[in-house]
Image (cartoon, grey):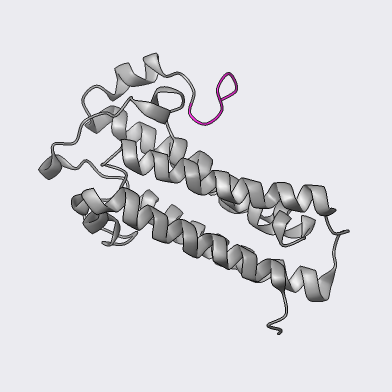
């Protein structure tokens, strides 16, 4: 209900700057990947469970966007983060976009749905960040989901972010089961790179 929320303007500025940078630097030479990502989150050949998870994730993300200002300006469910923690939130947002950009640069098969891209000669990518964890893009998304409400000063919304994060974790399990079955070499990749999101943890 107000235009006078400078933290939100900073957040929007970071989102716009990161999006423009990714489009100019990453997607400039990856037209096929850009075309695939513009196809949306519901596509032909996509497992039904993935369709459900993606719809739930988008709803959860939208709810997070709504819950954050509601808590900051109206509900005040928990105390606000201090300047150090909120600044850490902005750093998480920037780091999340950076990790996502590096993931796109390394993996030209990073499309928004689970599917075997036979027409694009789909192969396993194990270089760059994919040599550290199997799903670096999800790491970037999780940092974004946690960093945004912290920067906007809502601990309650940060706790709410657990819901879309849990959906991402569940999607990893669905995706890996699909790739083990459909993508040649993925099983061996999971033996070389043992961790999904966090080295030495999971």
Which quadrant: the C terminus?
A: top right
Q: Residue at x 49, y 23 (%)?
A: 195
Magenta stretch: residue 200 in it?
A: yes
Q: Horizontally, is 200 left or right of 120 in the view?
A: right
Q: Position of residue 114 (x, y in %)?
A: 31, 45
Q: Position of residue 126 (x, y in %)?
A: 33, 25
Tell me which residue sits at (20%, 53%) in the image.
31
Task: Count how many numbered circles sit on residues in the image.
Answer: 0
Q: Which residue is situated farthest in the right direction here?
A: 79
Q: Where's residue 116, x and y in %? A: 22, 41
Q: Is residue 152 left or right of residue 40?
A: right
Q: Residue 4 at x, y = what percent? A: 72, 80
Magenta stretch, overall SS: loop
| Closer to us: 73 or 53 | 73
Query: Would you say residue 33 is visible in this rendering?
Result: no
Pick the front one: 153 or 157: 153
- The answer to whether residue 86 is visible is yes
Q: Quadrant of residue 63?
A: bottom right
| Residue range of the region highlighted in magenta in the rendering | 196-202
Kindly indicate the quadrant of the structure image that contains residue 40: bottom left
Give me the residue at 39% from left, 39% from top. Answer: 103
Q: State which quarter of the image contains the N terminus.
A: bottom right
The residue lying at 49 percent from left, 44 percent from top is 98
Q: Is residue 92 left or right of residue 119?
A: right
Determine whether 29 is above or below 189 in the image: below
Q: Is residue 98 magenta?
A: no
């Amino acid at each position: 209900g107000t235009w006078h929320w400078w933290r939100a303007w900073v957040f929007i500025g970071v989102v716009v700057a990161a999006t423009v940078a990714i489009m100019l630097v990453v997607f400039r030479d990856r037209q096929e990947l850009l075309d695939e990502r513009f196809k949306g989150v519901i596509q032909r050949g996509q497992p039904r469970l993935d369709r459900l998870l993606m719809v739930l994730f988008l709803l959860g993300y939208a709810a997070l966007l709504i819950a954050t200002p509601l808590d900051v300006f109206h509900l005040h469910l928990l105390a606000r983060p201090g300047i150090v923690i909120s600044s850490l939130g902005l750093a998480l947002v920037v780091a999340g976009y950076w990790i996502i950009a590096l993931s796109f640069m390394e993996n030209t098969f990073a499309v928004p749905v689970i599917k075997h891209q036979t027409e694009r000669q789909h192969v396993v990518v194990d270089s760059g960040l994919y040599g550290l964890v199997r799903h670096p893009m999800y790491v970037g998304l999780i940092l974004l989901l946690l960093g945004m409400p912290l920067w906007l000063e809502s601990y309650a919304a940060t706790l709410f972010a657990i819901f879309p994060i849990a959906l991402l974790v569940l999607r990893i399990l669905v995706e890996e089961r699909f790739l083990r079955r459909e993508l040649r070499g993925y099983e061996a990749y999971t033996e070389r790179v043992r961790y999904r999101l966090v080295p030495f943890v999971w």
